Image (tube, rainbow, N blue to C red):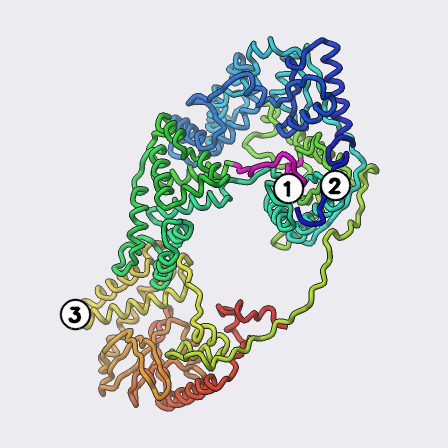
Amino acid sequence: MGEGLKRNSGAAGQGATGIVGDRWHTRLARIQSELQEAGVHPAHAVVLLPYLQLVPLAARFWAAQFPNHFMPHFETTRTWAERVGFFAPDEADLSFDQGRDLLAAARLLEQTPLRAERDALAAALVAQATELSRVIGAVAPAHRADWVAAAARFMPTAGVASQKYEAVLARVALAWAGQSGYATDALFGSDVGRDLERLFVVRGLEPDALTEALLARFADCVVEWAPDPRAAGATTRLHPCADAADEAERAAACVLNHLAEGRAPVALVATDREVTRQISAMLASAGVQPGVHLRDETGWKLSTTHAAASVMAALRACAFDASSDDVLDWVKLTPAFAPAERRALEHWLRHETVRGWSRATQLPDAPALVAAIEALRAPMAAGRALARWLAATRTLLEACGLWAPLAADDAGSALIQALGLDDETLAQWQAWPAARRRMDFDAFMHWARATLEAATFKPPKPAEADVVVLPLSQLLDRPFAAAVIPGADEKRLPMTPEITGPWSDAQRQALGLPTRTVVRAVQQAAWAQVFASPAVDVLWSQSTARGEALQASPLVRLLDFDDALRPVDDAPEPRVARTVMAIPTLRPKPVASRLPMGALSATSYEMLRACPYRFFAKHLLGLGEDSELDQDVEKRDWGTWVHAVLYRFHQALRDRPDGDRLVLIEAAAEQATRERGLDRNPGEFLPFKAAWPALRDAYLEWQREREAEGFRFEVGELPIQTRRGELLLRGRIDRIDRDAAGQRVLIDYKTEAQDKTRGRLKAGSEDTQLPFYALLSGDETPRAAYLNLDDRKGPSWWEVNDLAGRAAALHEGMAHDVERIAQGATLRALGEGDVCEWCEVRGLCRKDFWS
């Protein structure tokens, strides 16, 4: 652990004294006395505990209190059933294995009117059957059919149209849970009754139907204890926090302070999984390492682990309509491909703007890695039964190098078990009828995602830990030296937790499920157990991530009315203040006299004029961010598409001057759409495509008029690199025409609003694009114009005046600026104007932190 932290080896740490220790001492003394008076050997006695974590604790207390006596069986209903009998679920049983139960649920729904929605409704059916099993499993198998028949009266009526789904799901869930066998059925066997002479029951906070059934069955030999509602008069501190980050920091500081002052173990109550993980990370940075000094008894969803992310990335990459981003996400995780190959593939995909992976496989200049990836994806193409899907998934993971890391990782091993990818389970899938139904890829992905979402990963647990992460209800009867409860606000710690499921309160009462009244009582009882610890810190955030105000939980506010638990309102700041020397962040002012200038483009020179530092970073250093592949289609994509369409149209028209122009331009539009992958998600491009017919017709009419005036298309998308004096210039001219006199006309397409194009030609405008075109062309007296292609107003012509003069002035200015840079002029970050709002090097110049 971190330096300065120490574990308390005294009574509080070991739980030998205090209110919880007193409870156990009294309880165990009563058990020993009962056994001695009745002459019952401890081997024939069971102490039934409400949850598993109390079993080793009770055994330690017994060994310390009665070191020379035999120990009774400390059990939960689950461990007791496992000890007295072996159970393996039948094919039709509710197995509590999410992957298996989802398939069984889908198979059951195939026999109902909801057959078409079986995959979508399978998870809901599993949830309902699982909830009912808590009650049905407490009924002796011999009486279970009668109970189910009686319970059917409380199910929704199938004849009501609005209750169609609810009625079918509820009745199928009842039938499924009713005919299933359960591991705890062994507790109703005659062997248990013969061997059991005393049953001691320590009740939990929540009523348990199976415990009640066992109490009734063994009523003549039962001793029971209800939860003790007494509080210990704990020192309670309240910590209202500004936001979630402040809450996590304060909670971590509270834990560390308790440890530093010798109070251990500390209970860290998990009311919010995200905040708890933040706290755990902060504790780890302070030396309280998970799995060593910290034991997490709650775990988290298996789907959120790195192992699950790796497997799901591999599966998403194998989808028929996988995006390039999907494939890249997988490729970056696989050890099978060399890093240099991965980087080259990503650069190529982004440079070519290949959004859909299927397009990458069709391009002639694709890197060799594309074929290697396709060889791995190909076996996942066709539909098949689940067993074959899982076998193919394992083959894929082995081939791409992910299997070995998964098998060596705790979360990876849990994933292999949850999906059934190991050899033994794969063989079982092959033999199970429900797993033989043919599934397409989407159905398999849905099954895998739902299975991992329902599974919980719990990291390895040390036997002894200084910090224990646990749910609120499992503070019962556990001796902690201190408790820290973050998330104690009105949403995360309500007076009455929300009840999930389709049952009304009346139905829940009739079926024996917990009602709102019961849930409220359980929540209050669990809250009371917090104060069995000598020191308690209660924290809550006063605002949500959206800035909405949050109040403390009603349970916290009730503390003011309990004299024994009256808190310290103004809890001291638990964090240790540090003095940090202020280091101002200044505007960067680099000098680039020793860097090669390279070829200037119109865009790069605009950078220099807008912000010298941006020019330094992007042009001189060559820095740049990769474009996003899977982003929404925007106005810029529309402009690029229009450029491509007109280029292909005029190329085709030059080859076929007598061709049908409407046919030619539509063919060009379809080709441009395919090449840019815009046909993969046609809905995204639809708003722009809807404007195309009007612009197309207006453009064809405008082109006819221009040709009537003697203009002729000469070339489009012409790349040029030329030297003008000391300057090396490069660029691409959208289009060059010849007018009636044979003079070249340089044209730049604009799909912006006409007012913006008009502003480029106003007096005093610093627009440089057309003068730069003139310098590139090499002509002494060219003409140049913007062709605005506003999709609402149609084409409009905006020709620049005094082009030669503007080009000469531009050349002089560029030469002067380049000379100053060579002489050591600073390229200062300006931090002014609209350019800063979208500048991609803003994080590099640190504008937001300038002093």
Looking at the rendered image, the quarter that the C terminus falls into is bottom right
The image shows residue 532, relative to residue 405, as above or below, that is above
Kindly identify the residue that appears in the image at 64 percent across and 26 percent down.
Answer: 55
**Position above or below: 243 against 825:** above
On the rendered structure, is 688 left or right of 235? left
Q: Amino acid at mark 2?
A: Arg
Name the residue rendered at 44%, 85% in the picture. 818
Residue 531 visible at all:
no
Earlier in the chain: of badge 3 and badge 2, it is 2
Identity of the residue drawn at 46% across and 30% down: 164
User: Which residue is nearer to you in this view: 209 or 421?
Assistant: 421
Find out whether the residues at labels 3 and 2 contact each other: C-beta distance under 8 Å. no
Write down the quadrant of residue 443 in the picture: top left
Which stretch appears magenta? 456-472
Which residue is labeled 2 in the image?
263
- Looking at the image, residue 114 sits to the left or right of residue 672; the answer is right
Q: Tell me the residue that label 1 is attached to.
A: 293
